[in-house]
Image (cartoon, coloured by chain):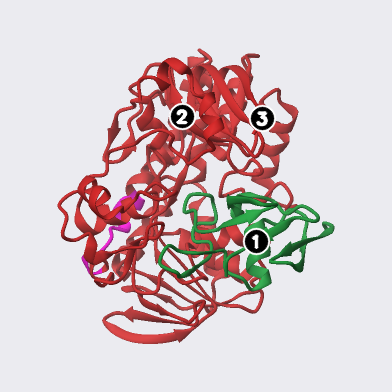
Chain colours: A green, B red
Amino acid sequence: MSEAIEVRVNGKPVMVRAGTTVAVAVLASGASCRTSVSGQPRSPLCGMGTCFECRVVINREPQRRSCQVLCESGMEIEADG
Amino acid sequence: MASVKHLTFDVAVVGAGPAGIAAALAAANSGKAIGLIDDNPAAGGQIWRGAQNAPGHSAASSWFERLSKSAVQIVRGAQVFHVADGQLAAESDDSAFQITYGKLILATGARELFLPFPGWTLPNVMGAGGLQALVKSGLDISGKRIVIAGTGPLLLAVAAYARKCGANVIGICEQTTRPRMARFGLQMMLVPGKAAEAFRFAYDLRGIPHWTDCWPVAAFGSRRLESLRISRQGHISEIECDYLACGFHLIPNVELARMCGCRLQQGFVEVNEYQQTSVPGTYCAGEPTGIGGLELALLEGEIAGYAATNWEDRAKHLFSRRARYQKVVRILKDAFPLRAELKNLAQPDTLICRCEDVPQVRLREHSSWRAAKLHARCGMGPCQGRVCAPAAEFLFGWEIDSVRPPVFPVHCSSLAAIPSHSAARH
């Protein structure tokens, strides 16, 4: 069993197993990833880094593709939804 | 962003899926410096995503073990965004790389074809491979109601995987016809290893409805997917579900090959028997040369790796095995042609470009992809048309042939990794 780590999505603590991507942590928190240019909630489509629907702010850095980033303990994730 | 790191390899392999791993290992036999560059957090590509942590994945584990024992230098989490004049430029979390190579092997894999229909932008409507990738990345789907839709054998693999992970797979909507599906099954029986695979799927999928002539018509939900309307042999019905995993087979990632100047044929990279492209010293292996699956990708990778290190005899030795799997490419192509009805799913207000939120009505007035980009901003967002261009190609018959550097959005500071003489040309 891999260890559990805690990240925060919009300030809310989310526990995930090590090796989990940020996209999955965002989905687990109940949030969507981003708001589209016309105001729609969006979440991952491709899961492999090509669609850019899963963009979130990670540790203050915007426009990160959350499906390609692994969760690290204490990570601050800002999702739009 | 830190300053640019310089790396030099005799052979640089882009993409650490099965084809890239096989290519790098074959090339490493020569004792030369081999680099394997990949944008994912770990090697394995899509089919072996997460397999390094999942015990019991025997085929993958033996390759990973060989890779870890080899002298191949792996550059993980690095997105290649430029190639010119024997140099790649890549970007990772905290660095930019300028990678000089003698030979180049492109093993850039494939992505899914997504077709727009009303509601396809709702959260929890995902690709078929997309859902699988997220589950492999930690998403818990136990007890979730999932509909799997689109076309091709990936749907069966995803359904079997989702069930194994505890999901309630409500049904598989396959757009192709029952006779085509049956013929596909018979033909695949003649490919080594596929009969056993088919029986395993049949067992794993027992009790899950497999509807042919069936596709999603619309997805509904307020902030996420709640229900789905499908057309099944001409009849419309509605299903409540938590996830829709929907992909219309695979399309090759050929952006870097295009940028290298490699000749393409019907959208795929043209290669000779040694997997060499029309550009001398540049090779291509796996799905970009034709969608043929795991076994073919591994063999093509090995052949490319040997050929790129002047070991033609070893490469030749694999030709006959490769030929046995090459027929899969044709079988897949013939079994799952997309039917014309799918072109009518997108309504005037259905978004085609998800980055710039461009609806179908703003595209149909244009006569080319270029005009649609210029006037409607379709394909001008961060995915650079990776999702909407193939959809537009299918919907409107447009030819999509342009590629512009950088082939992925990068930090301005990473542009310094582009060699100055080639940057000046763009």
Q: Read off the chain for label 2.
A: B
Q: Where is residue B158 in the image (x, y as percent from the top left)?
A: 53, 63
Crowd rating for badge 2 (residues with CA inside 10 Å; few <14, some 14–19, many 20+): many
Q: Name the residue under label 3.
A: B2
Identified by mark 2, the residue type is His
Task: Tell me which corner region of the image, top left, top right, bottom left or bottom right, holds residue B239.
Answer: bottom left
Residue B307 visible? The answer is no
At x 46%, y 78%, the residue is B209
Asked if disc 2 and disc 1 are in contact, CB closer than 8 Å, the reply is no
Main secondary structure along the magenta-highlighted residues: helix
* Disc 1 target residue: A78
For the residue pair A46 and B166, the one nearer the viewer reads as: A46
| Separation of marks 2 and 1 at Cα, in angstroms | 30 Å
Classify mark 2: helix, strand or loop.
strand
Q: What type is the residue that disc 1 sits on?
A: Glu
Is B345 above or below relative to A20? below
Q: In this view, does B407 lie above or below B389?
A: above
- Respond whether the residues carrying marks 2 and 1 are from the same subunit: no
Image location of residue A38, percent across then percent down: 40, 67
**Which residue sits at x=36%, y=80%?**
B230
CA–CA distance in space, label 2 to label 3: 18 Å
Q: Which chain carries label 1?
A: A
* Relative image position of residue B107 (x, y in whole percent): 49, 34
- B375 left or right of B356? left
Give amino acid for label 3. Answer: Ala
